Protein backbone atom coordinates (compact mmCIF):
# COMPACT_ATOMS: atom_id res chain seq x y z
CA UNK A 1 0.00 0.00 0.00
CA UNK A 2 1.12 3.53 -0.71
CA UNK A 3 0.99 5.94 2.26
CA UNK A 4 -0.60 9.33 1.70
CA UNK A 5 2.69 11.05 2.54
CA UNK A 6 4.28 9.80 -0.69
CA UNK A 7 1.59 11.42 -2.83
CA UNK A 8 1.95 14.68 -0.91
CA UNK A 9 5.75 14.45 -1.22
CA UNK A 10 5.43 13.99 -4.99
CA UNK A 11 3.11 16.97 -5.30
CA UNK A 12 5.37 19.14 -3.11
CA UNK A 13 8.35 18.22 -5.30
CA UNK A 14 6.46 19.07 -8.50
CA UNK A 15 5.36 22.40 -7.00
CA UNK A 16 8.95 23.29 -6.07
CA UNK A 17 10.29 22.33 -9.50
CA UNK A 18 7.63 24.58 -11.07
CA UNK A 19 8.47 27.35 -8.62
CA UNK A 20 12.15 27.08 -9.56
CA UNK A 21 11.17 27.41 -13.22
CA UNK A 22 8.96 30.44 -12.55
CA UNK A 23 11.77 32.14 -10.62
CA UNK A 24 14.54 31.49 -13.15
CA UNK A 25 13.24 31.20 -16.73
CA UNK A 26 13.87 34.06 -19.14
CA UNK A 27 11.59 32.70 -21.85
CA UNK A 28 7.90 33.55 -21.37
CA UNK A 29 6.73 30.23 -22.89
CA UNK A 30 8.91 28.24 -20.49
CA UNK A 31 7.51 30.40 -17.70
CA UNK A 32 4.02 29.17 -18.65
CA UNK A 33 5.31 25.57 -18.82
CA UNK A 34 6.60 25.93 -15.23
CA UNK A 35 3.20 27.25 -14.10
CA UNK A 36 1.54 24.16 -15.63
CA UNK A 37 3.91 21.93 -13.60
CA UNK A 38 2.97 23.78 -10.40
CA UNK A 39 -0.75 23.39 -11.12
CA UNK A 40 -0.33 19.67 -11.76
CA UNK A 41 1.42 19.26 -8.41
CA UNK A 42 -1.53 20.96 -6.72
CA UNK A 43 -3.95 18.69 -8.61
CA UNK A 44 -2.20 15.53 -7.38
CA UNK A 45 -2.52 16.86 -3.83
CA UNK A 46 -6.26 17.52 -4.22
CA UNK A 47 -7.04 14.12 -5.72
CA UNK A 48 -4.90 12.23 -3.19
CA UNK A 49 -6.54 13.88 -0.17
CA UNK A 50 -9.97 13.26 -1.70
CA UNK A 51 -9.21 9.55 -2.18
CA UNK A 52 -7.82 9.08 1.36
CA UNK A 53 -10.28 11.20 3.35
CA UNK A 54 -13.48 11.56 1.32
CA UNK A 55 -15.20 8.19 1.28
CA UNK A 56 -18.37 9.35 -0.48
CA UNK A 57 -17.34 12.90 -1.34
CA UNK A 58 -16.13 14.14 -4.72
CA UNK A 59 -15.00 17.62 -3.67
CA UNK A 60 -11.30 17.11 -4.37
CA UNK A 61 -11.87 15.65 -7.82
CA UNK A 62 -14.33 18.42 -8.70
CA UNK A 63 -11.75 20.99 -7.60
CA UNK A 64 -9.09 19.28 -9.71
CA UNK A 65 -11.43 19.44 -12.71
CA UNK A 66 -11.97 23.15 -12.13
CA UNK A 67 -8.21 23.69 -11.81
CA UNK A 68 -7.70 21.92 -15.16
CA UNK A 69 -10.35 24.15 -16.77
CA UNK A 70 -8.96 27.38 -15.34
CA UNK A 71 -5.41 26.32 -16.24
CA UNK A 72 -6.50 25.73 -19.84
CA UNK A 73 -8.07 29.20 -20.01
CA UNK A 74 -5.04 30.79 -18.36
CA UNK A 75 -2.49 29.18 -20.65
CA UNK A 76 -4.53 30.08 -23.75
CA UNK A 77 -4.63 33.75 -22.76
CA UNK A 78 -0.98 33.66 -21.64
CA UNK A 79 0.27 32.17 -24.91
CA UNK A 80 -1.77 34.63 -26.98
CA UNK A 81 -0.31 37.48 -24.92
CA UNK A 82 3.20 36.12 -25.57
CA UNK A 83 2.50 36.00 -29.31
CA UNK A 84 1.03 39.53 -29.28
CA UNK A 85 4.09 40.90 -27.45
CA UNK A 86 6.34 38.97 -29.82
CA UNK A 87 4.72 40.80 -32.76
CA UNK A 88 5.43 44.11 -31.04
CA UNK A 89 8.95 43.53 -29.67
CA UNK A 90 10.26 40.55 -31.71
CA UNK A 91 11.24 38.78 -28.49
CA UNK A 92 9.78 36.33 -25.98
CA UNK A 93 12.29 37.02 -23.22
CA UNK A 94 10.82 38.48 -20.06
CA UNK A 95 13.81 40.85 -19.72
CA UNK A 96 12.63 42.59 -22.90
CA UNK A 97 9.06 43.04 -21.68
CA UNK A 98 9.63 46.46 -20.12
CA UNK A 99 6.87 48.48 -21.78
CA UNK A 100 5.23 49.22 -18.45
CA UNK A 101 8.51 50.02 -16.71
CA UNK A 102 9.15 53.70 -16.26
CA UNK B 1 1.96 -4.49 -8.21
CA UNK B 2 0.16 -1.15 -7.92
CA UNK B 3 2.92 0.11 -5.64
CA UNK B 4 5.68 -0.77 -8.13
CA UNK B 5 3.81 0.96 -10.97
CA UNK B 6 3.16 4.01 -8.77
CA UNK B 7 6.80 4.40 -7.76
CA UNK B 8 8.04 3.95 -11.35
CA UNK B 9 5.55 6.62 -12.58
CA UNK B 10 6.35 8.95 -9.67
CA UNK B 11 10.12 8.81 -10.20
CA UNK B 12 9.79 9.27 -13.96
CA UNK B 13 7.37 12.17 -13.35
CA UNK B 14 9.95 13.91 -11.16
CA UNK B 15 12.66 13.34 -13.81
CA UNK B 16 10.41 14.65 -16.62
CA UNK B 17 9.45 17.76 -14.62
CA UNK B 18 13.07 18.59 -13.79
CA UNK B 19 14.11 18.01 -17.42
CA UNK B 20 11.34 20.22 -18.79
CA UNK B 21 12.48 23.08 -16.55
CA UNK B 22 16.24 22.68 -17.06
CA UNK B 23 16.75 21.43 -20.63
CA UNK B 24 18.21 23.96 -23.09
CA UNK B 25 15.93 23.68 -26.13
CA UNK B 26 12.41 25.11 -25.71
CA UNK B 27 10.81 22.50 -27.97
CA UNK B 28 12.42 19.67 -25.99
CA UNK B 29 11.12 21.34 -22.84
CA UNK B 30 7.56 21.15 -24.26
CA UNK B 31 8.01 17.45 -25.13
CA UNK B 32 9.24 16.66 -21.60
CA UNK B 33 6.23 18.57 -20.26
CA UNK B 34 3.92 16.36 -22.37
CA UNK B 35 5.52 13.24 -20.86
CA UNK B 36 5.20 14.71 -17.35
CA UNK B 37 1.49 15.44 -17.93
CA UNK B 38 0.95 11.86 -19.15
CA UNK B 39 2.62 10.61 -15.96
CA UNK B 40 0.27 12.79 -13.89
CA UNK B 41 -2.61 11.02 -15.67
CA UNK B 42 -1.06 7.73 -14.51
CA UNK B 43 -0.91 9.03 -10.92
CA UNK B 44 -4.63 9.92 -11.18
CA UNK B 45 -5.37 6.35 -12.34
CA UNK B 46 -3.52 4.98 -9.29
CA UNK B 47 -5.82 7.12 -7.11
CA UNK B 48 -8.99 5.56 -8.66
CA UNK B 49 -9.73 8.82 -10.49
CA UNK B 50 -10.02 7.36 -13.99
CA UNK B 51 -12.20 10.18 -15.31
CA UNK B 52 -9.67 12.81 -14.23
CA UNK B 53 -6.91 10.82 -15.93
CA UNK B 54 -8.89 10.82 -19.18
CA UNK B 55 -9.58 14.56 -18.87
CA UNK B 56 -5.89 15.15 -18.13
CA UNK B 57 -4.87 13.39 -21.34
CA UNK B 58 -7.59 15.10 -23.40
CA UNK B 59 -7.19 18.66 -22.15
CA UNK B 60 -3.50 18.85 -21.27
CA UNK B 61 -1.74 16.49 -23.65
CA UNK B 62 -4.25 16.95 -26.46
CA UNK B 63 -5.08 20.64 -26.13
CA UNK B 64 -2.61 22.66 -24.12
CA UNK B 65 0.48 20.88 -25.46
CA UNK B 66 -0.59 21.50 -29.06
CA UNK B 67 -1.02 25.16 -28.16
CA UNK B 68 2.43 25.32 -26.55
CA UNK B 69 4.07 23.74 -29.60
CA UNK B 70 2.22 26.17 -31.91
CA UNK B 71 3.37 29.11 -29.78
CA UNK B 72 6.98 27.86 -29.81
CA UNK B 73 6.92 27.42 -33.58
CA UNK B 74 5.21 30.80 -34.18
CA UNK B 75 7.80 32.73 -32.20
CA UNK B 76 10.90 31.97 -34.25
CA UNK B 77 14.48 32.38 -33.00
CA UNK B 78 13.61 31.19 -29.50
CA UNK B 79 14.38 27.56 -30.34
CA UNK B 80 17.97 28.67 -30.88
CA UNK B 81 20.22 26.78 -28.47
CA UNK B 82 22.79 29.55 -28.26
CA UNK B 83 20.39 31.87 -26.41
CA UNK B 84 20.59 31.71 -22.64
CA UNK B 85 17.23 30.50 -21.23
CA UNK B 86 17.90 30.88 -17.52
CA UNK B 87 18.26 34.23 -15.81
CA UNK B 88 21.20 35.27 -13.64
CA UNK B 89 19.22 34.58 -10.47
CA UNK B 90 19.12 30.81 -11.02
CA UNK B 91 21.17 30.11 -7.87
CA UNK B 92 18.89 32.31 -5.75
CA UNK B 93 15.82 30.68 -7.34
CA UNK B 94 17.23 27.24 -6.55
CA UNK B 95 17.89 28.20 -2.93
CA UNK B 96 14.38 29.65 -2.49
CA UNK B 97 12.60 26.66 -4.03
CA UNK B 98 14.77 24.19 -2.09
CA UNK B 99 13.96 26.09 1.11
CA UNK B 100 10.23 25.94 0.41
CA UNK B 101 10.57 22.22 -0.34
CA UNK B 102 12.28 21.82 3.04
CA UNK B 103 9.36 23.57 4.74
CA UNK B 104 6.97 21.21 2.91
CA UNK B 105 9.02 18.20 4.11
CA UNK B 106 8.81 19.39 7.73
CA UNK B 107 5.05 19.90 7.43
CA UNK B 108 4.51 16.49 5.79
CA UNK B 109 6.54 14.55 8.35
CA UNK B 110 5.09 16.43 11.33
CA UNK B 111 1.53 15.27 10.56
CA UNK B 112 -0.30 12.10 11.53
CA UNK B 113 -1.77 11.56 8.07
CA UNK B 114 1.77 11.09 6.70
CA UNK B 115 1.70 7.27 6.81
CA UNK B 116 -2.05 6.84 6.44
CA UNK B 117 -2.95 3.88 4.21
CA UNK B 118 -5.49 3.74 1.41
CA UNK B 119 -9.01 3.12 2.80
CA UNK B 120 -10.89 0.16 1.26
CA UNK B 121 -13.36 0.77 -1.53
CA UNK B 122 -13.27 1.89 -5.10
CA UNK B 123 -13.19 5.64 -4.58
CA UNK B 124 -15.86 8.01 -5.75
CA UNK B 125 -16.18 6.91 -9.37
CA UNK B 126 -17.65 8.67 -12.37
CA UNK B 127 -21.21 8.37 -11.05
CA UNK B 128 -20.55 10.30 -7.86
CA UNK B 129 -18.38 12.85 -9.67
CA UNK B 130 -21.11 13.61 -12.20
CA UNK B 131 -23.74 13.93 -9.46
CA UNK B 132 -21.54 16.31 -7.44
CA UNK B 133 -20.76 18.36 -10.54
CA UNK B 134 -24.41 18.88 -11.43
CA UNK B 135 -25.92 19.30 -7.94
CA UNK B 136 -23.54 20.70 -5.28
CA UNK B 137 -21.14 22.35 -7.72
CA UNK B 138 -23.61 23.32 -10.47
CA UNK B 139 -23.00 27.07 -10.07
CA UNK B 140 -19.15 26.92 -10.21
CA UNK B 141 -19.53 24.54 -13.16
CA UNK B 142 -21.51 27.18 -15.05
CA UNK B 143 -18.99 29.85 -14.06
CA UNK B 144 -16.21 27.73 -15.55
CA UNK B 145 -18.07 27.64 -18.86
CA UNK B 146 -18.46 31.45 -18.80
CA UNK B 147 -14.75 31.77 -17.95
CA UNK B 148 -13.78 29.52 -20.87
CA UNK B 149 -15.97 31.58 -23.22
CA UNK B 150 -14.36 34.80 -21.92
CA UNK B 151 -10.88 33.30 -22.41
CA UNK B 152 -11.82 32.27 -25.97
CA UNK B 153 -13.09 35.74 -26.89
CA UNK B 154 -10.15 37.42 -25.14
CA UNK B 155 -7.63 35.21 -26.95
CA UNK B 156 -9.20 36.05 -30.32
CA UNK B 157 -9.25 39.80 -29.56
CA UNK B 158 -5.65 39.90 -28.27
CA UNK B 159 -4.27 37.65 -30.99
CA UNK B 160 -5.98 39.42 -33.89
CA UNK B 161 -3.67 41.24 -36.30
CA UNK B 162 -4.77 44.87 -36.48
CA UNK B 163 -5.13 46.20 -40.00
Image (tube, rainbow, N blue to C red):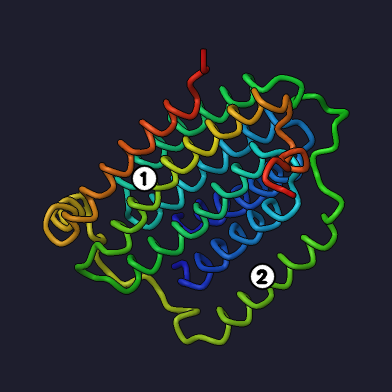
> Can you tell which mark lies on residue A69?
1
Residue at horizontal 36 percent and vertical 55 percent from the top: A64
Q: Residues within 10 Å of mark 2 (few under 14, many from 20)?
A: many
Write down the residue under mark 2. Answer: B101
Q: Quadrant of residue B83?
A: top right
For mark 1, name the chain.
A
> Are circles 1 and 2 on residues that touch, CB within 8 Å?
no
For mark 2, name the chain.
B
Q: Quadrant of the N terminus of chain A?
A: bottom left
Give the SS element for disc 1.
Answer: helix
Relative vertical location of residue B11 with respect to residue B71 in this rendering, above or below = below
Left or right of B137 on screen, residue B67? right
Q: Position of residue A45 (x, y in %)?
A: 45, 64
Q: Quadrant of residue B106?
A: bottom right
Residue at horizontal 50 percent and vertical 25 percent from the top: B159
Mark nearer the viewer, 1 or 2: 1
> Which residue is more in the foreground, A80 or B38?
A80
Q: Position of residue B73 (x, y in %)?
A: 64, 20
> Which residue is more in the foreground, B75 or B81?
B75
Q: Position of residue A26 (x, y in %)?
A: 76, 43
> Which residue is more in the foreground, B73 or B123?
B73
Left or right of A17 on screen, residue B3? left
Cα distance between the residues tagged 1 and 2: 27 Å
Amino acid sequence: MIPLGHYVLLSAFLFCVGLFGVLTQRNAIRFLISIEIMLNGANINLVAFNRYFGASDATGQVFALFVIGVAAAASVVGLVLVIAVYRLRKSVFIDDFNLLKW
Amino acid sequence: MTETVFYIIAVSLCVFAVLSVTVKDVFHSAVWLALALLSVAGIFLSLDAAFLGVIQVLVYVGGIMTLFIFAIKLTARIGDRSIRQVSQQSVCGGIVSAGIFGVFLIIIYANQWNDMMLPPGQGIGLNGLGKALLTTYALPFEFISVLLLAALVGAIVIGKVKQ
